Amino acid sequence: MQAFDFDLFVIGAGSGGVRLARMSAAKGARVAVAEDRYLGGTCVNVGCVPKKLFVYASHIREDLEDGEGFGWQHSGSLNFDWASLVNNKNTEIQRLNGIYKKLLESSGATIINGRARIIDQHTVEVNGQSYRSAKIAIATGSWPFIPDFEGNEHAITSNEFFFLETLPKRAVVLGGGYIAVEMAGIMAGLGVDTTLVYRGEQLLRGFDQELRLFVKDEIEKKGVNLLFEDNISAITRIDNDQLNVKLESGGTIEAGMVLAATGRKPHTQDLGLENIDIDYDRSGNIKVNEHYETAQKGVYALGDLIGGMQLTPVALAEGMYLAQHLFGDTPPQTVDYENIATAVFCQPNIGTVGLTEEQASERFSKLRVYTSSFKPMKHTMTGRNERSFMKLVVDDASDRVVGAHMVGPEAGEIIQGIAIAIKAGATKAHFDQTIGIHPTAAEEFVTMREVRD
C-alpha cells in the first residue's frame, strides 16, 4: 500500500471545488484544497456576486426618478461615487471569502495557498512541496479571453472591471452574450455612454428568439447603443484616458474603456496536465465520464472545465455528486441537466427555464405557444417606457409546459418557482387551475389563455 497524505486533493477553491472538498471532508475523507487566488472562485470574486451588486447600483437612479410618480420629491442632481461602490463591494467580498475559509476549516479540509501542479497520477506540488493523494480533482474553472486583434492589450475583461479606479465617460463592450449585456447595462445605468458591438445578427444566441428580439428593444430603451454584424479590428491609445476603437465596418469610436465579453475558456494553464493522461474536446474542455473521471484513472474534473453550463449551481451539484460517489455509503443521484433555470441580469432581467420555441419545435410535432406583453404595474404611475414579456411553450400532445421565458423585473425570482413546476412535469392545465397572486406580474403565467398565432 502506498502512503498518501490525503484521500482527495482538490485543485481550485471555487464553487465546485469548495463543495466537493467540504462534503468529502464531512464524510471522513482527508482532504486538501489548493487555491492561488481567492476562495470562492469566479462567482464570489469577479462573477455572480459583484455583478449583481453592481446591477443593483446601476438601477438606483431609475428607482429614485420613478419615485416622483409616487409623490417622492428629490432636489438637486443625483451624484454617484464609483469608488464608494467598489470599496463597499470589496468589503462584502472579503466577508464572503472569510465565510468560505471557515466552511472549509470547520469541515476538516486543509487549505493550501498557492498554484498546484500535477506531477503524476497521485502527486501534486504546491510552492515546491509535494503532496501524495489517492484521488485528485481539478476544479479551476474558466477564464475570460480577449480575441486576437491589433491593440487587444488595451481591452479589459469583466475580471478587471470590478476593480477599476475610475469609471469612464464612454465605453465599448465587445460581445453579445449574457456577460456582455449585463456589463453594458451596468455601465449605462451608472451614466456611462455605452456602445455594445457584436459580430452576430442578434443578442443572446441560444435563447428563445422571440425573447431575444423583445429584450433587444428594452436594452436600447435603457440607452445602450447596439451595433450588430460588426467587430473591433484595432484599438489604439490616444492618451492616458482615451482609446480609438476601429471597427471592421470602417467606423471608429473614441472611448475611455473597451471591455471584451467574448466568452470564457477552461483555466487549465500551468496545472501540469501534460504529466498525466487527459483528453480534451475541440474547445479545450476536459473530457470526463459519467462520474467526472478523466482519462487518467483517479483524476477527476468538474465545473466550467468540462464544457457544460457555466453556472455556479451546476458546479455545486457536480461537487455534491462526486463527494458522494467517492466517499458516500450509497450511490449518488445523477445530476440532472434537463430544465436548468437561469437568469440574465440585464435591464430588465431575463429568466428562462426549459426549451426555447425553436428547440421544442424540433422535438415535438405540434406546439401551443402562449405569450403576454404588458407594462409593469409600477410604471403605470412612473410613465417609464418599459415593458415585460412572458412566454409558455407547451407540447400539444401531452399538454406539458416544456419552456417558460420572461423579461421583466425580478424575472429570475419568478422563474425559479416556475422551474420547480416544469421539473415536476406540470401541464398547461395545472397552470390554468392555479389561482394567481393578485396583483403581481407572476400571476400572468397562470392566466394566459390565448394561443399565439
Image (spheres, rainbow, N blue to C red):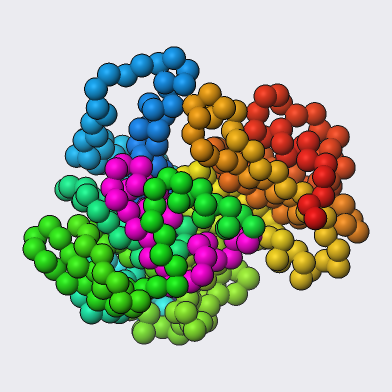
x and y percentages locating residue 326 in the rendered image: 56, 62
Left or right, 53 with reference to 383: left
Q: Quadrant of the C terminus?
A: bottom right
Q: Is residue 89 above or below residue 357?
A: above
Q: Is residue 152 above or below residue 31?
A: below
| 445 vs 308, nearest the viewer | 445
| 380 vs 323, nearest the viewer | 380
User: Looking at the rendering, which quadrant does residue 266 occupy?
Assistant: bottom left
Q: How many marks?
A: 0
Left or right, 404 with reference to 366: left
Q: What residue is at 88 percent from the left and 57 percent from the top?
A: 396
Left or right, 47 with reference to 151: right
Q: Give the farthest residue toward the left.
A: 239
x and y percentages locating residue 235 in the rendered image: 22, 72
- Would residue 151 be counted in the magenta stretch? no
User: Looking at the rendering, which quadrant does residue 71 occupy?
Assistant: top left
User: Looking at the rendering, which quadrant does residue 293 occupy?
Assistant: bottom right
Left or right, 254 with reference to 119: left
Which stretch is magenta?
A: 180-209
Q: What residue is at 52 percent from the left and 65 percent from the top?
A: 202
Residue 123 at least partly seen: no
- Would residue 185 be counted in the magenta stretch? yes
| 372 vs 279, nearest the viewer | 372
x and y percentages locating residue 79 in the rendered image: 23, 31
Q: What residue is at 77 percent from the left and 49 percent from the top?
A: 370
Q: What residue is at 58 percent from the left and 52 percent from the top?
A: 214
Q: Is residue 25 above or below residue 57?
A: below
